[in-house]
Each structure stands twice: as C-alpha cells, then as structure tokens.
Amino acid sequence: MHDAATHAAAHDDSKGQYFWVWGALLVLTAIEVVLGYKQIFSPVRMLEVLLVLSIIKSALIIGYFMHLKFERAIMRWMLVISVTACFIIMYFFFFPDAGRIVTLGVK
Amino acid sequence: MADATLQHDAVGHGVPGAYEAPLFGAYSKKVGMWLFLASDSLTFGALLIAFCYVRIYTAWPTPFHVQSIVNSTIMTACLLSSSLTMVMAVFAAQRSDRTWTRYWLLATMAFGTAFIVLHGMEWSKLIDEGLTLPIFPKPEHAAVGELADISKNTPQFPATFFGLTAMHMLHVTIGVIYLGVIAFRKWFLPVLGLLWIVGYVLIPSDNVFHYGIHVLLIGLIVASVILFLKPKDYDAQDVEVSGLYWHFVDLVWMFIFPLVYLLSTKIT
C-alpha cells in the first residue's frame, strides 16, 4: 500500500515536470519572437543567439519529452556523440567552401 | 530443450549469444526508432546547413511581415502543445488506459492537423503574392510585387524555403497518419481515404496542395499494407515509439522556425 502511494506521488511529480518543460519551451519561443521583432542584434549575432536558444529547446525536448535523460547512460552517450560528430564533420565540409566562394568574389 | 541448453551454455560459459542482455537496456523497436531519428536529423541538418550556405553568399531577402510571424508563432505553439499531449498519451498507455490514450492521441493529431492547415494557408498566401517555384502550377494572373521580385532575382530563397518547409510538412503529415494508425488501427483508413478525396475535390487545381494532397493516398496505401501484414493491437511500447517520432518532428521545427522565419523578418 505504502509502495503504491509513493509510486503514485512520484508519478504526479514526473507529470508536473512535463508541464514545466512545456512552459519553458513556450517562454523560449516568445523570447525568440521578441528578438526577431526588436532586431537589436546584427544578423550574425542574431543567428548565434537564436541557435543557442534552439539548442537549449532541443535539449529540453530530447531530454524530457523524448525521455533520453532517463535512458541508460550508454544509449545517451552513443546517440549524442554520434549525431554531434556527424554535424561537426558536415560543418567542416560545408563552411570552408562557403568562405572560399566569398573570397573569390562570387556574388 | 534445445533452448534450455543454449541458455545454460550462454550463461554458464560466458559465451555471448541469444540470451545476452540488450546493450541499450531498451526494447529493440525503441532503439530502431532512435537510430532512424539520428539519420533523419542528419537529413534535416544537411538541408539546414545548405540553407545557411546559400544564405552566406546571397543578398538574402527578408519578406516575412508581422502576419507571417504571428502565423508561424501560433504554428510553433501548436507543435509544442502537441508534444505535451503526446507525453500524456504515453502516460495513459503505460497505465493501460485505452480510452485516454485515444483521447490524447486525438488531441495530438488535432494540433498536428492545425499546424498543417495553418502552414498550407501560409504557403498559399505566399504563392498568391508571387513567391513561387517553376514546378508549381501557374496562376491565371502573374503576381507582381515584392515576393514576385524575390522569385525572379533570388530563386534560392523560394527553393530553400519551400524545400525545407515541405520536407517538414511531409514529416508532420506522416506523423499524423502514424498516430492515427496507432490510435484507431484499420478504422483510421477510411477517414484517411475520405480526407484525401475531399481535399482533392475541394482544393482548386491552381493550388499546389491539389497535388500535394496525394501524400495522403500514399500514406493510405502504406498504412493498409502495414495493417494487412501485421494486424496487431498496438501497445504502450508502440505509443512510446510513435511519440519519439512526433517529438522529433517538433524538435526539427525548433530550428526551422528561427532560421527560416525569424532571421528573415521585416517588421514595419
């Protein structure tokens, strides 16, 4: 009986945390939209700020909604490291080339 | 008997074999979905990086006025809320509450459908105003104005915009069909067929969605084949795995929304 009650309490707590995450995601989206409206940053700085906010949002979604935070450590690390590594490789292939086009003066 | 021997051998002599514990501590469907999502994230990553790449060396237009931004913000809120209802559906499935699992899945599908409809209206508005691609149906009267100029002078803009958002819209549509099949199994198929026919008849032939609606027919065929081959009752694991896919679709939009919309705003 005691176990069941504890389990139910834990269950409610965990449900509450999803509402918090949802609220945080909505607030972060609102911040992004306000930044888009105010245009206080230069485009490059704006890109950096928006990307950081997006990465925080995606971490919340992956960690809580997709439950990765509660998976086994090997699964967490395997997925995060492999996907991040692929993106870094993609970045190295794409952007030096984009810079080369700029310095060649191709518009 | 043979199984028992195998198990004894595997445990007794430390031989890795059929009875080894799963490496990730999760059932295989979930691991499979995670691997698919990892590869799909690279598809979207490549598209987004290509978008940034084109943007770096092109004088990039900023055509999105207040109305577009308000619309896309509502779409973002719809997707975020659909993720919450999806989490509730997974909870309901885990406590074997079939009725509430269906209700929550239905709510998730409703939010997803709202997203698709809002996005479709946004597309139609932009196309009417002249932002278009050569493959889209030609309007009777060619549009003039800011967006028509963009299509002529910077074709990279409509190409990347429609490419990225169409790929995402396709994923949302597949997600709604996926959830519909999980929630209602074969009873969802006639609904899907009806939506396809009604959509095809009602959407005028000079609108791009007159052809885009055929995605529903392809979805109907694929879902029918799957349900024919495996007419099973979907359990809590299936709901959780479909939830992973749904949250991923939400996740991708969290990058498309700021990169495509918020970096191209024109607030006057």
Image: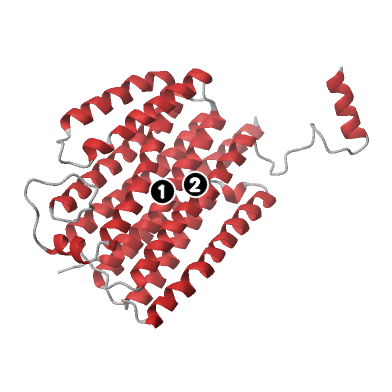
Indicate the chain on which mark 2 is placed.
A
Q: How many marks?
A: 2
Q: Residue at x 32, y 75 (%)?
A: A43
Indicate the chain on which mark 1 is placed.
B
Residue B96 visible? The answer is yes
Q: Residue at x 41, y 22 (%)?
A: B184
Name which residue type carries label 1.
Asp
Residue bearing the label numbered 1: B250
Residue bearing the label numbered 2: A65
Point out residue A1 in the picture as x, y percentages from the top left corner.
65, 29
Name which residue type carries label 2.
Phe
Quadrant of the rendered image containing residue B180: top left
Say whether mark 2 and mark 1 are on the same chain: no
Point out residue B38 in the picture as x, y percentages from the top left corner.
55, 50
Residue B232 visible? The answer is no
Quadrant of the rendered image containing residue B170: top left
Q: Decide: is B106 above or below B33.
A: above
Of B79 and B151, which appears nearest the observer? B151
> Decide: marks 1, 2 in contact (CB < 8 A)?
yes
Q: How is the image coloured?
A: secondary structure
Left or right for B48, reference A30: right
Q: Residues within 10 Å of mark 1 (few under 14, many from 20)?
A: many
